[in-house]
């Protein structure tokens, strides 16, 4: 194991040494970072790490999506122990399993911890939120209590981030299950569908896809949730594709979500807001994206193509949709022109890797008083497609982006989550075990350098 870690470190250090000056394919100009960082592999051997939070004693708690475990890791030496195993979690190759993790705001007193994961009810795949209690003496999470069950789930676009708000309510990001694209293109996309009063009373949460949900810690509907189409439910915002990042910053809730062939989004999420998907990707600018409702075609299953590539079928321009509650993104990454060539032969069957989206998987905030002066008051976004961290400066009131994206730490990996250390001197990243991505030369690859690892980039200034 020691030899393996030494080799992994050497490989990773080499990657880091060449990563900074590289041009990013379709992502803007080359970036030469000035801040001095050192890279270290803290731990490897994790089974698809998905979420991590700071926990008691300066430890990291990490969920393993496919491992169906919550582990505690000492970031100083990589020592690991298992806090919880979740045998009933339904796992899959990419989107299913044990996902989000959040500690209650009063964790020091209550010891309460919240998780969400996919599970099976018979042969139906669903999603739920479960509360646990931390037993410090045993070093285990115990007393599982289901607080919200029966949320639709599937094999794509699960969402799954879980965070507490300043008012003590719990927020869960929920994707639209990848409906209307690829293998799921004949399934109707319901990111715009809102629950009816009858559904809410019956505990039918079938409309809870493509949404950000807001719930009380016991799973009930908060009294001040928005009333949408005359109905109050767990729905806080809607019109989302695959929101995999949530973060509160100075009283503002930010989220990142993955776009299709264009327009990944950074959003400021406000109560009752409609963020447009699938009718709008990014801004309603009638560029490369136009909505095609595959499920409306009687011959959908036999029609070649999918929602990414413009087919010979009727499409709906973004500007044709007029909704008063539509909220524009804070920033998109990136909007492509209507004549953009998506089928680049350089990328072959992995053409989507050539699209100028970054597949954002999480976000964190670098504080305004942090020791890295150039990074202060910035959002950090992790990328699956590029194995990089993108930094975006914010305005003084943290309501707007202020400047351009800056790219850091590009390695041959898929970055699942980024997390800033409490002292602001270290940037932690967990990596996927497998998947497609662009390597340091901007070429398609399926061989990650640091599978299932916890990496740290330490500031030496």
Image (cartoon, helix red, strand yellow):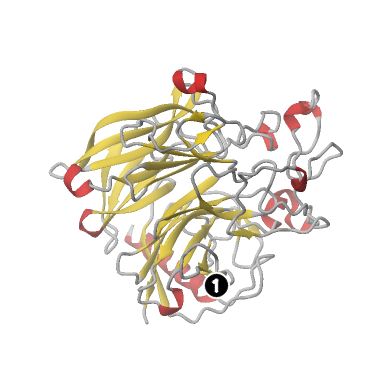
Residue pushed farthest right? 312
Residue 443 in percent (x, y) is at 66, 62
Residue pictured at 58% horizontal, 59% vertical? 330
Q: Using the image, determine if residue 232 lies above or below residue 7.
A: above
Camera-side residue: 201 or 71?
Answer: 201
Q: Quadrant of residue 357?
A: bottom right
| Location of mark 1 (residue) | 19
Residue 336 at least partly seen: yes
Q: Quadrant of the C terminus?
A: bottom left
Camera-side residue: 288 or 3?
Answer: 288
Q: Residues within 10 Å of mark 1 (few under 14, many from 20)?
A: many
Residue 433 at least partly seen: no
Q: Is residue 290 left or right of residue 16?
A: right
Q: Quadrant of residue 154?
A: top right
Residue pictured at 31% horizontal, 37% vertical? 217
Residue pictured at 53% horizontal, 46% vertical? 243
Q: Quadrant of the N terminus?
A: bottom left
Camera-side residue: 18 or 37?
Answer: 37
Residue 118 in percent (x, y) is at 45, 32
Secondary structure beneath label 1 = helix
Residue 333 in percent (x, y) is at 63, 59
Residue 454 in percent (x, y) is at 39, 58
Q: Using the image, determine if residue 41 lies above or below residue 425.
A: above
Camera-side residue: 243 or 60?
Answer: 243
Q: Using the image, determine if residue 392 lies above or below residue 89.
A: below
């Amino acid at each position: 194991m020691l030899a393996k870690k030494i080799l992994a470190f050497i490989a990773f250090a080499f990657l880091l040494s060449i990563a900074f000056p590289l041009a990013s394919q379709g992502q803007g100009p080359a970036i030469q970072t000035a801040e001095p960082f050192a890279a270290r592999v803290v731990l490897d051997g994790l089974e698809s790490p998905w979420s991590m939070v700071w926990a008691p004693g300066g430890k990291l708690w990490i969920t393993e999506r496919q491992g169906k475990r919550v582990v505690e890791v000492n970031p100083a030496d990589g020592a690991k122990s298992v806090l919880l195993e979740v045998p009933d979690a339904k796992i899959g190759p990419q989107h299913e399993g044990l996902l989000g993790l959040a500690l209650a705001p009063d964790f020091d007193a209550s010891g309460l911890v919240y998780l969400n994961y996919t599970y099976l009810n018979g042969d139906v795949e669903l999603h739920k939120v479960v509360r646990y209690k931390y037993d410090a003496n045993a070093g285990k999470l115990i007393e599982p209590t289901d607080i919200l069950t029966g949320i639709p789930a599937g094999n794509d676009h699960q969402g799954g981030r879980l965070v507490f708000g300043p008012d003590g309510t719990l927020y869960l990001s929920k994707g639209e299950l990848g409906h209307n694209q690829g293998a799921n293109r004949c399934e109707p996309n319901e990111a715009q569908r809102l629950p009816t009063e009858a559904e809410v009373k019956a505990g039918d949460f079938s409309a809870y896809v493509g949404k950000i949900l807001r719930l009380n810690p016991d799973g009930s509907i908060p009294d001040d949730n928005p009333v949408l189409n005359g109905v109050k439910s767990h729905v806080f915002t809607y019109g989302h594709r695959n929101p995999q990042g949530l973060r509160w910053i100075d009283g503002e809730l930010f989220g990142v979500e993955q776009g299709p062939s264009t327009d990944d989004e950074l959003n400021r999420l406000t109560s009752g807001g409609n963020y447009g998907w699938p009718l709008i990707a990014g801004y309603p600018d009638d560029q490369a994206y136009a909505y095609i409702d595959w499920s409306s075609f009687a011959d959908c299953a036999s029609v070649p193509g999918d929602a990414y590539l413009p087919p010979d079928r009727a499409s709906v321009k973004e500007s044709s949709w007029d909704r008063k509650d539509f909220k524009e993104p804070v920033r998109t990454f990136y909007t492509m022109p209507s004549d953009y060539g998506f089928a680049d032969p350089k990328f072959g069957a992995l053409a989507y890797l050539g699209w100028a989206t970054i597949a954002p998987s999480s976000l964190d905030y670098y504080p305004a008083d942090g020791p890295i002066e150039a990074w202060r008051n910035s959002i950090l976004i992790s990328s699956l497609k590029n194995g990089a961290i993108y930094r975006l400066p914010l305005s003084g009131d943290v309501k707007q982006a202020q400047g351009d994206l800056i790219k850091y730490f590009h390695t041959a990996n898929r970055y699942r989550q980024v997390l800033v250390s409490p002292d602001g001197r270290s940037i932690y990243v967990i990596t996927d075990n497998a998947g497609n991505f662009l390597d340091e030369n901007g070429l398609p690859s399926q061989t990650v350098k640091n599978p299932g690892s916890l990496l740290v980039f330490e500031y030496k200034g």
